[in-house]
Amino acid sequence: MDEPKSTTNETVRLEAFSDNVFAVAITLLIFQIRVPPHEPPGGLRVALFDLWPSYLAFLATFMTIGVMWLNHHRLFSLVARKDDGLIVLNLLLLLVTTWLPFPTALLAEHLRGPHHDQQAAGVVYSASLFAMAVAFNVLWRYAVSIDAVGEHANVSGISRQYAIGPLIYAVLVGIAFFSADWCLVISALYALYFALPPSLWRRRRR
Amino acid sequence: MDEPKSTTNETVRLEAFSDNVFAVAITLLIFQIRVPPHEPPGGLRVALFDLWPSYLAFLATFMTIGVMWLNHHRLFSLVARKDDGLIVLNLLLLLVTTWLPFPTALLAEHLRGPHHDQQAAGVVYSASLFAMAVAFNVLWRYAVSIDAVGEHANVSGISRQYAIGPLIYAVLVGIAFFSADWCLVISALYALYFALPPSLWRRRRR
Amino acid sequence: MDEPKSTTNETVRLEAFSDNVFAVAITLLIFQIRVPPHEPPGGLRVALFDLWPSYLAFLATFMTIGVMWLNHHRLFSLVARKDDGLIVLNLLLLLVTTWLPFPTALLAEHLRGPHHDQQAAGVVYSASLFAMAVAFNVLWRYAVSIDAVGEHANVSGISRQYAIGPLIYAVLVGIAFFSADWCLVISALYALYFALPPSLWRRRRR
Amino acid sequence: MDEPKSTTNETVRLEAFSDNVFAVAITLLIFQIRVPPHEPPGGLRVALFDLWPSYLAFLATFMTIGVMWLNHHRLFSLVARKDDGLIVLNLLLLLVTTWLPFPTALLAEHLRGPHHDQQAAGVVYSASLFAMAVAFNVLWRYAVSIDAVGEHANVSGISRQYAIGPLIYAVLVGIAFFSADWCLVISALYALYFALPPSLWRRRRR
């Protein structure tokens, strides 16, 4: 009775708002990479190569947010209704998502710095991804708990699949103490892995 | 007869545009936090801790805009039609919302500065939140005045609830003269309070 | 036959894309205002007052883009179908719109500079608004020319009303040679005038 | 069975998300152009003229992204359903699109620099456009391969038309070794050519 207009598509505006946030966050990442200023003649090529930590960080975070959007999309394709708790938990996920450009730029900036700074940047980056994965899991489990998820056979299977994210990213926090480079590479590969398998699996099923 | 296409969903494009603005504003907040440059070896950790006023300001404004979006969402779930006045008053609310990243960055920058500067930044921040709450109330009361709000029993109850915002933020302006820190903390707590209760209350009702 | 899916709402995605651009442009304006750095103790208040050209420019351009969005909204409420020409002319309008943050920041920066620089900034600002108004008129007339506008009695009346914009802004370019301040004030007042009357007029009609 | 809600409009949310990304990327381009600071009195006019590489780069990339959005729009007007592969390939196209503001700013910055730097910037710019065109073609061919494209007579004609893009941009990479200016001019003209003909052709058809 609180929302008389949107009976059939309860979650439409929530999804649209979230999509907006994902889209803006993912598009703004590139603005963390500074264009190299005028170098000694012919020096631009070297300066562009030296920016590789920025490219790698851009790529890893783009893929991570992209996959998060994809998962968010799938999650809400299963969620038939919303309540205030779901909205607030969704905002929590968006909070962590909009935060991501900061650790991304941080890691890009310090990936070639002294070891202690690499460590600090890597831990902040990994911990941010961990927080995002946790927020996503909380959102999903809340949706299940209020019976917002349709009569879909595989709820527990999905829950198990989603639970892998926080585990991986928790391990990543540990890895950050040894190598910030590996943090970026692993998070990029993990996003790639998450993006690809269902598609391969689905095609085989048909 | 002016808008022949959108008979059933008069306010859809208005809401979509507003959502866009809220989403962009909320996502851009993070870009006000500068990544610490190369420090003396091992100095990044300290530099990151010293940024806490920026994190706090980011969090407080994110939550405030998030709750404003939520309220905007609820408001328009009750509004069945629009006229030009409603559109213009909605633009006024968006004006204040897009302004918010500036006082947020201002307060983050000067929260550890001399007392007079803290005061100035705190007053600008609090006054901006006050303006936002006033704009929201004006929008709501205008919608009621043109009978755009559906046959919903509790119009006066909602009006009373919404009227609390300007009161709280007016008090916050006063507090800013004494402590800018408390401005941030109180605005964050107030947003949190606004976000949570309906959900708790609703669940109990079921 | 080229767009089989969207028979009833041909212009929906075009409008949504335009709304996105308007929303991002309007929200990003604030990021052209730099937060004053640490001043001599107590100096922030003065520094904040000295930023008034930036606030004024922010306000004037926000209102101008806001009214342009409103007009775009009204225009497309009358346009029942689209073709490639309409899409390209719409992109032209968006091109000028996304350009606006630059002259806005330019004018804010140089409004207190030497007279010749004020002039240059004022002319660029006014000419940009002129280009926007022209692009809007071209879009409207094209829509009329391809019979995309529904059986609406008042096409010629709307055409006349829209034609005022380029006239006003052409005069504004002339004014810019004498006073950049008046450019901002007049463009803000003109946007305000455009936003308000229909609403007042409409209410009286009822 | 995975997405029970969106039976009729399978690709709606995918298109909306893509539109968001295109809209944000196209609107943010202007923020790569820095407002000239206070110059010697009367010097602003010269400084504004000297920014022409930035204006040209802004224009060329705006048009390129605009045409890409237009093509994306047309492509999805023919695509009736999606699978995970299509979503991931669409993300790949968005990845390249969000990357574009970087080479744009790079080319604007170094278009008047020493020849070797012009070359480097021009090659990065052209190669980025090439990557975008390739990503678009891969997306289209994948959509055809999963039979997501409706019973449209002219699939092979469209495929041929789309294949021109990568060819043109491959040539552009070669041109970049000789002249970065021509890269910008040609890419702008190519976008213009792509935008206009169908409209002219269509009108003649009627």
Image (cartoon, coloured by chain):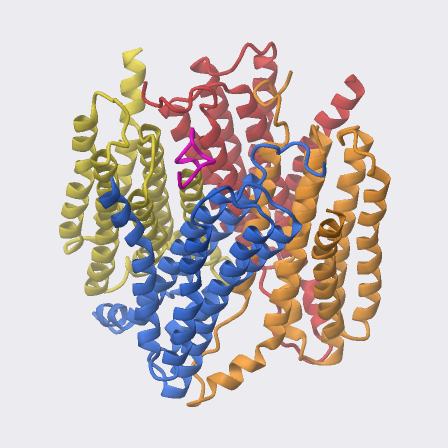
Chain colours: A red, B yellow, C blue, D orange
Image point (42%, 77%), residue name: C173
Percent from the top left, x then y, of residue D12? 59, 32
In the image, taking residue C37 as reference, residue D39 lies left or right, namely right
- Find residue C108 and report its image quarter: bottom left
Q: Is residue D102 above or below residue A97?
A: below
The residue closer to the viewer here, A199 or A100, is A199
Q: Which residues are magenta?
A: B1-12
- Of residues C8 and C47, the one drawn nearer to the viewer in this rendering: C8
Identify the residue shown where x is 34% and y is 33%: B81
- Residue B9 covered by magenta stretch: yes
Question: Is residue C128 rendered to the left or right of residue B56?
Answer: right
Whether residue A116 can be seen here: no
B194 and A113: which is toward the camera? B194
Q: Main secondary structure of the magenta part?
A: loop
**Above or below: residue C186 compared with residue C86:** below
Q: Where does the image place residue D20, in percent across and percent down from the top left?
A: 55, 45
Whether B9 is drawn above or below D187: the answer is above
Q: Quadrant of the C terminus of chain B?
A: top left
* x and y percentages locating residue B131 in the rendered image: 23, 50
